[in-house]
Amino acid sequence: MTRVLFVTSEVYPVIKTGGLADVSASLPEALCRQCHDVHILLPGYPAAMKAARASGSRRQARLVIGQYSVALWRTRLPGTSVTLWLVDCPGLFDRPGNPYQNEEGEDWWDNAHRYQLFCRVAAMMATGQAGLRWTPDIVHCNDWQSGLVPVFLEPAPNRPPVVFTIHNLAYQGLFSHDTFRALGLPDSLWRFDRLEFHGQLSFIKGGLVYADRITTVSPGYAAEIQTPGFGYGLEGLLQYRSEHLSGILNGIDTKLWNPATDQYLDCHYDADTLASKQECKAALQKQLGLVPGDAPLLGSIGRLVEQKGIDWLLDALPPLLQQGCQFAILGSGEIRYTEPLRALAKTHPGQLSLTIGYDEPLAHRITAGSDLFLMPSRFEPCGLNQMYSLRYGTVPVVHRVGGLGDTVLDPDQVGHSQANGFSFYEPTGGAFRTSVERALECRQQRKRWRQLQSNGMAGEYSWKERAREYGKLYQTLLEERCLTR
Ligand code: ADP
C-alpha cells in the first residue's frame, strides 16, 4: 500500500472545467480500490467548501503562510471513500466563476499567488509540516497549478518522490518577471533550466524540471510533446527528460458511463441489445427538436476552442447538412465559434441542434443517441469523449493525434475486423470531411457498421489496468529512493 497525495486543481463532481476533473476523481478511486491510500488535495473553492460543511466535515489544521491564514479541511470525495483535503483560504479561493477565471472569462489577476499558496500547502503536507498525522510516500502533481510543489520540495531532506502528470501542455501557467518577484521566489530559480521560460515565469517547468517522473495521459502524446509541433518550445526539455517521461493512457469511469445503466438515459442497451440504441436516438431527436427518422446523427461535445478543431467542423458542416446529416452539438467557448454555429442552427432548424453551456445529462444522451461522434482536435493529450462514445457503440471520427490515435483504430490501419472508428492524419478540414464521408459510407453497410460498433463496445477503457501502471511507477520510485539512501 502506497500513501499518495494527489494534488489537483479540479475534481469531479465538486468542480470541473475539463478532463482533468474526471481523471482526478476516477484515478484516485481506482488506486484506492487497489489498496493504495490516496488523498486528494484541492483548493477550497466555494462549491467544495459548501459540500464539506454540509457533510459535517471539520477543520483539521491551521497554517499561516506569508500574509495568509489557511485552514485544512478533511472530507470525502462525494460518492466515494477517497479522502479529500481542502485548502480553505477565502481571500484566494472563495470566488464566483470557475477555478481559473472570473465570470467575464478573464483569468483571475492573482492566479500565480493562488496556486503558489496551494503548492506551498501541498509541500507542507508532503513533509509533515502541516500538523497532520497523515503524510504521503509519494506526491502526485497534475498540470501547471501544482508545478511549484516539486520546486518547494527539492531542498527538503527525506522528501517523498514526486510524479508530475501533464494533462495538457498548452496550459503552462506563464506569468511576468514582476510576478516572479512578487511571489518571493529565490533569484536562483530565474534560469532557463529552472523556472524561466523566454522571459516569463513558467509554473509547468517546475514540474518538468524538478519532478522525479513525468507522465502524460497517452503514449501518443508523450511522443508528440517531444517534437516542435506539439512541444510549445518545451520539447527540448522534454527530450532531455525523456528517460523519466512516459505516457499512461487515461481510463474512464465505466460505472458512470455505461449504456446499460446510465442514470441519464430513459432507454438502456448493451452490445447484445444494440437495437435499443435506436430508442436513445429517437429520444434525443425529440428532446432537441430534430426531425425524427434514420438520418445519420452526428454528435459533438466539448470546449469550443481552437484545440478542438472547431474551424474544421465549421467547414464540414454545410456540405454534410446538404447531404441530410443531423447534428447534436454541445459545448461552450469562444465567440468566434459559437456565433457561426448559432447561425447554422438558425438556418437549419430540425437538423442542427446547438446547446451552448455545460450539461452533463445531455452529454450522456448525445453520446448514446448519436450514430457518429466527431473529434477533429488539432491535438488531444488523451480525450475522454471518444472512449465514452466507443463504449456506447457510437462510432468516433477523430484526428489521429495523441490519445485519439491510441484509442481509435481506422479500418485503413487495422482492417475492418479490428477497427472501431475512423481517423484522419493530415491536419486539414478536408481530411476531416473525407473521414466523415468514409464513416457515412460504411454506415450503409449494416454488417460492417455493426462490427465497428461491437469492436468499440468490447474495448477495455476502465482504470483498472491503467491505475496499476501508476501503482507500478510509484513502487519503482520508492525502490529507487531506498537504493539511494
Ligand atoms: P478537455 O479536458 O480538453 O476539455 P477531455 O475530452 O479530456 O477534454 O474531457 C472533457 C470532459 O468534459 C468530458 O468528460 C466531456 O464530456 C466533458 N464536457 C466538455 N464540455 C462539456 C459540456 N459542454 N457539457 C457537458 N460535458 C462536457
Image (cartoon, grey):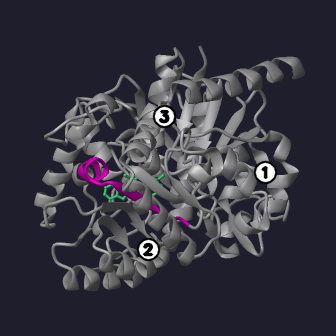
Give the extent of the magenta segment: 363-377
Q: Note whether 461 is above or below 314 in the view shown.
A: above
- Tell which circle, 3 or 1, labels the residue nearer the N-terminal end: 1
The crowding category of the residue bearing disc 2, from other C-alpha atoms within 10 Å (few below 14, some 14 to 19, many at least 20), is: many
Which secondary structure, mark 1? helix
In the image, what residue occupies the spot 23% across and 29% down? 56
Which secondary structure, mark 2? helix
Q: Note whether 101 is above or below 294 in the view shown.
A: below
Picture quadrant where residue 353 is located: bottom left
User: x, y percentage for residue 427?
Assistant: 62, 71
Residue 209 shown left or right of residue 253 in the figure = right
The crowding category of the residue bearing disc 3, from other C-alpha atoms within 10 Å (few below 14, some 14 to 19, many at least 20), is: many
Amino acid type at image mark 1: Val
- Assess whether residue 376 is covered by the magenta stretch: yes
Amino acid type at image mark 2: Leu
- Tell which circle, 1 or 2, labels the residue nearer the N-terminal end: 1
**Rendered image: mark on residue 406:** none
**Rendered image: mark on residue 209:** 1
The residue nearer to you, when weighing 460 against 126, is 460
